[in-house]
Amino acid sequence: MEGKEVTVGIIGYKHPQVLPLLEVGYNNVKTNTYEHKMFDNEIIKCPMEVSKEVEEKIKETALNIYKVLNAKDFARIDMILSKDNVPYFLELNTFAGLTMSSSKGEKHVHHGYMGYMAKAAGLTRGEFIRKIIESAIERYKLK
């Protein structure tokens, strides 16, 4: 299927928050390899550039998938957005990478897709992880 690869990060359980959409593009390859991804050779657009209507359709679809598959606290939903702007579900990643640089200007830190999305949402590394932990604490009814 031709289209754009989009990934949607969601954090929370009781009141899940959908993060800004991320589009993954490729440099000189047709698929994402370990080397391509880990050495930051991808073309990352976050937030993804789509119309508000298409963005809402993607987010609504991802949130429904998150809930139906009973994801908890955080997950990443990967999709293909077809040329006619229909989002097609590929996979749910319940152990998505959470890496992101701090605001202290580290020289080079690989960002996981969730890290890019959290940063685009205006979250610091600490706020991002805290939201995930607080969701689990609330879900397990811990103090």
Image: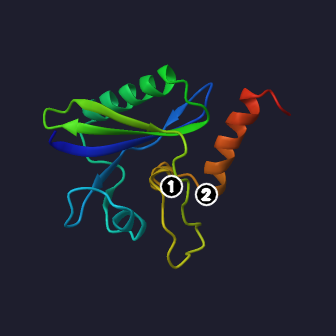
Residue at the spot of label 1: 115
Which colour scheme appears in the figure? rainbow
Residue 53 image label: none
Badge 2 marks a residue whose secondary structure is: helix
Compared to residue 111, the image places residue 54 above or below, namely above
How many residues crowd around disc 1 within 10 Å: few (fewer than 14), some, or many (20 or more)?
A: many
Q: Is residue 96 left or right of residue 29?
A: right
Of the pair 136 and 46, the residue shown nearer to us: 136
Q: Amino acid at mark 1?
A: Gly
Direction right: furthest residue:
143
Residue 125 image label: 2
Q: Amino acid at mark 2?
A: Arg
Residue 45 in the image: state x and y as whole percent. Answer: 32, 55
Which residue: 30% across, 53% down? 24
Of the pair 90 and 16, the residue shown nearer to us: 90
Q: Quadrant of residue 12?
A: top right
Quarter of the picture holding the N terminus: top left
Which residue: 31% across, 48% down? 48
Q: Is residue 74 left or right of residue 141?
A: left
Badge 1 marks a residue whose secondary structure is: helix
Of the pair 100 and 56, the residue shown nearer to us: 100
Q: Is residue 122 left or right of residue 52?
A: right
Residue 46 in the image: state x and y as whole percent. Answer: 36, 53
Quarter of the picture holding the C terminus: top right
| Earlier sequence position, callout 2 versus callout 1 | 1
**Residues under labels 2 and 1: Cα distance?**
8 Å
* Circles 2, 1 touching at the beta carbon (< 8 Å): yes
